[in-house]
Amino acid sequence: MSDSEKIREKLLEWEKEVVEPLLKKAPERKKVFLTEEGIEVKRLYTPLDLEKWDYLEKLGFPGTYPFTRGVYPTMYRGRPWTIRQYAGYGSAEDTNERYRYLLSIGQTGLSMAFDLPTQLGYDPDDPLAWYEVGKVGVSMPTIQEMDIVFSGIPMDKISTSMTINATAIEILSMYVAVAESRGVPKAVLDGTVQNDILKEYIARNNYIYPPEPSMRYSVDLILYAAKEMPKWNSISISGYHMEEAGATPAMEVAFTIADGMEYVKWVMERGKVPVDSFAPRLSFFFAARTNLFEQIAKFRAARRIWAKVMKDRFGAKDPRSMMLRFHTQTAGVLLTAQQPMVNIIRTTLQALAAVLGGTQSLHVNSYDEALCLPTEESVKLSVRVQQVILYESGVVDTVDPLGGAYYIEWLTDQIEERAWKYIDEIERMGGMLRAVKLGYPQREIAKAAYEWQLKVEKGEIPIVGINMFVEPEIPKVKILKVDPAARERVVSRLRKFRESRDQVKVRTALDNVRKAAEKEEVNIFPPIYEAVKVGATVGEISRVLREVWGEWRAPEIF
C-alpha cells in the first residue's frame, strides 16, 4: 500500500469514527466556509491535497526561481522589510515635521502622499484646486516645496517612495533636482515612484491624459530611470487600489500582473531595449486584508506568476527580472469609524500576513484613518506594530515559515489558477490597455465590490462593529485637521516664487516640453526635468501637456 493510500484510509477512518459522531452532537458553525475569494475551505488538509505536487517546480528555494518562498535567500534574517508610513499633508513645513517625527521613532523609509491638485496637475492657486490644497497629501507645485520637505533629511541615505502617477515625472524631477543641488547625484538615489497610470484608469481615477500618451509618459520615466538612476524603482505596479475598489484576491493579482506585462511590452517596443535592461527595477504594490492565510497565499502566488511570465513570455535571463519585489499597505477599505481601536487588531493581522507573505516594504494604516489623517499618536502605534512583529514575534527567524503547509500550498495553487484565467482573458483581448478601454477590469471589480457589500449587509461577511457586536455611538478620538493657514502659506510662496523666476528661461523650457510632447520619438523626461529646474510649476507643465495630448473621459462600463 502506498503512502497516499494509507493516508486516505486513515482519513476516512478519522472522519467516520471521530468527526461524524461529534457533528451529531455539536454541528460546525457554518455549513460552508469560504475565503474572501469565494474558495470553499475544507475541514482539513493533508498530503492528499498536494498529490503529484512537485516541490522544486512549485516552491524551490528562497531567492531562486520561481521565488514562491521569497525573493532573497535569507529574507528577513539578513534584510528586514522597510518600515514606511504613507505620510504628507498641508504645506511642506507640516510634512517635513511629520517625516522627521517618523524617522525619530524608527521608520526606515519615507512614503510621500501628495494632495489631489498635485496629483491632477493643478497649482494650488487654481480655482479647481482651492478646496483640496494639502488635504490628502502635501501640496507640491514647485521645486522649492520639495526642498523644504527634505530640509534636514539626508537624501543620499534614505529610501523615498512617492505615490504619484499622472505627474510622476514632474515630482521625481523635483526630487532629483533638489538632491543634486545638495551634491547628491541621481545615480545614488534610492526609492520608488508609483508611475502606474493603468491602475488609475481601472480603479483610482486620478489620470489626466488619454491612455496612449499616458503610457508613453510612464514608459519614458522607466527608460530614463533605467539609464540614469540604477537604484531607483521606476514604477510600482499597484494592485492595492484595485483591492480598495473591490477586487477579489485573484483579481488583484491578475490585473496587477497584466498591468506589469503591458508596461514590459511597451518599454521593450518603445525603447528597443532587452527586458533585463530595465525589469530588475520594476516593483509592485499590494493590499493586505484580514483573511490571514488567503492573503499569504496571494502574495506567494503573485511571485510565482510573475517569475513564470518574465521567464517564459519575455525571455528574461537575469533572475532579478523575475523577482516580484513588493510594498504592502494594510487595507484602508476595511478600517471602520465605528470602534476605531479595533482597527489596531485588524491592521496587526494584515501586517502579519504581509510579513509571512514576504513583503519588502510595509505601511500599517493607523486606527483613526477612517475618521481623519493619522495623528502622531496613532502613527507611532502603527510603526510599533511593525517593530513588534520584526523584533518580538519570531516569525522572521526562518524564511517562509508557512512553506509546505498543506492548506497554504493548496490555497496558493488555487489563487494562481484563478489569476491565470483573468490574465489569459486579458491577453486574448489584446493586452491590458485594450481591456481598460473596453472597461473589462473596471466591470469585474465593480461587480465584485457590489457582491461583497451585499454580503456585508446580509451579515454573510462578518465585520465587528458593522454587522456584529455593534455599539450605538462612535467613540471620540483625537482628530487631526489640516490647518487652513497651510494653503495660504503654499499659495503665497508660489506667487513669490513665480515672480522671482527667470521668465524667459521658463517660457523656453515650457516650449521645449511642448515640442517634445508633439514628437512621439522623443523621451519626455529630460525636457520636463529642465523645466522643473528653471522653476516651471506642476500646473504649467501639465497645462502644456493637456494642450498637446488632451484629457481623458472614462467610458461607460455598464
Image (cartoon, rainbow, N blue to C red):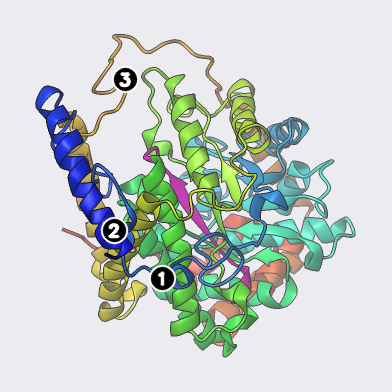
Q: Which residue is mark 2?
A: 48
Q: Is residue 53 left or right of residue 327?
A: left
Q: Is residue 175 above or below residue 341?
A: below
Q: What residue would you read off at disc 1?
A: 54
> Which of the two labelled residues, at mark 3 and mark 2, occupies the earlier sequence position?
2
Which element is circle 2 on? helix
Q: Residue furthest bottom?
A: 272
Q: Which mark is residue 465?
A: 3
Q: How far across and how far down the image is residue 528, in percent?
A: 65, 69
Residue 386 lies in magenta, yes or no?
no
Give, as a three-letter code, the residue at label 2.
Answer: Leu
Q: Pick the residue in front: 239 or 295.
A: 295
Q: Residue furthest left?
A: 24
State yes or no: discs 1 and 2 in contact (Cβ < 8 Å).
no
For this view, does 223 lie left or right of residue 228? left
Residue at left offset 77%, top offset 61% = 189
Position of residue 523 in the picture relative to residue 479 (left or right):
right
Residue at the spot 55% in from the left edge and 45% down from the top edge: 355
Whole-percent x and y of residue 517?
55, 77
Residue type at numbered disc 1: Asp
| Residue 392 occupies quadrant | top right
Q: Residue at x 59, y 70 (%)?
A: 64
Q: Which residues are magenta?
A: 279-291
Specify whether residue 283 is painted magenta: yes
Query: CA gap, disc 1 to disc 2?
Result: 13 Å
